[in-house]
Image (cartoon, rainbow, N blue to C red):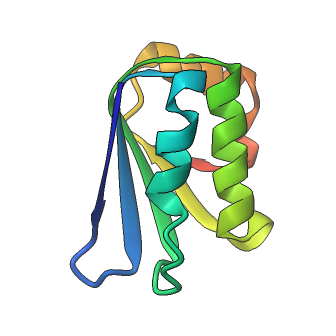
């Protein structure tokens, strides 16, 4: 598991890429990825193109990010999910909370 971050060219979007398993062992790394105190970030993108597995603790971490980003007013997108990850997000009704592409 590895978590990498990068900024969009304008600096307003933080892109968090998750490689491998996204589970409880990722908790601190994932939190560190977005809790950096930078007020310029307004959008968050979770890139799951290399995510192979997602468990209930990962779902909880996504909810924590959503709260951090402003709850209902926050802009968090989940992108590039494989079929298994997308199925887990769908079963969990995350389409109602996040933009999933």
Residue 42 horizontal/vertical position (percent): 52, 78
- Can residue 100 be seen in this snapshot? no
Q: Quadrant of the N terminus?
A: top left
> Does residue 24 appear left or right of residue 34 in this picture?
right
Residue sitting at x 36%, y 58%: 15
Residue 70 horizontal/vertical position (percent): 72, 71
Please determine whether, in this image, residue 45 is positioned above or below residue 80: below
Please determine whether, in this image, residue 26 is positioned above or below residue 21: below
Q: Image quadrant of residue 8?
A: bottom left
* Number of numbered callouts drawn: 0
Q: Image quadrant of residue 51?
A: top left
Residue 44 horizontal/vertical position (percent): 48, 62
Residue 49 horizontal/vertical position (percent): 31, 32
> Does residue 72 appear left or right of residue 86 in this picture?
right
Residue sitting at x 77%, y 64%: 71
Please determine whether, in this image, residue 87 is positioned above or below residue 32: above
Residue sitting at x 56%, y 50%: 31
Residue sitting at x 69%, y 64%: 68
Q: Quadrant of the C terminus?
A: top left
70, 39: nearer the viewer: 39
- Can residue 64 be seen in this snapshot? yes
87, 22: nearer the viewer: 22
> Does residue 91 appear left or right of residue 32 in this picture?
right
Q: Residue furthest left?
A: 9
């Amino acid at each position: 598991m590895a978590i990498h971050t990068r900024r969009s060219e304008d600096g307003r979007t933080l892109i968090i890429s998750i490689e491998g398993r996204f589970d409880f062992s990722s908790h601190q790394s994932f939190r560190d990825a977005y809790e950096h105190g930078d007020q310029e970030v307004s959008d968050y993108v979770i890139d799951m193109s290399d995510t192979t597995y997602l468990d209930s603790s990962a779902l909880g971490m996504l909810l924590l990010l959503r709260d951090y980003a402003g709850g209902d007013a926050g802009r968090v997108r989940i992108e590039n999910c494989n079929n298994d990850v997308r199925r887990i997000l769908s079963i969990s009704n995350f389409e109602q909370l996040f933009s999933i592409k």
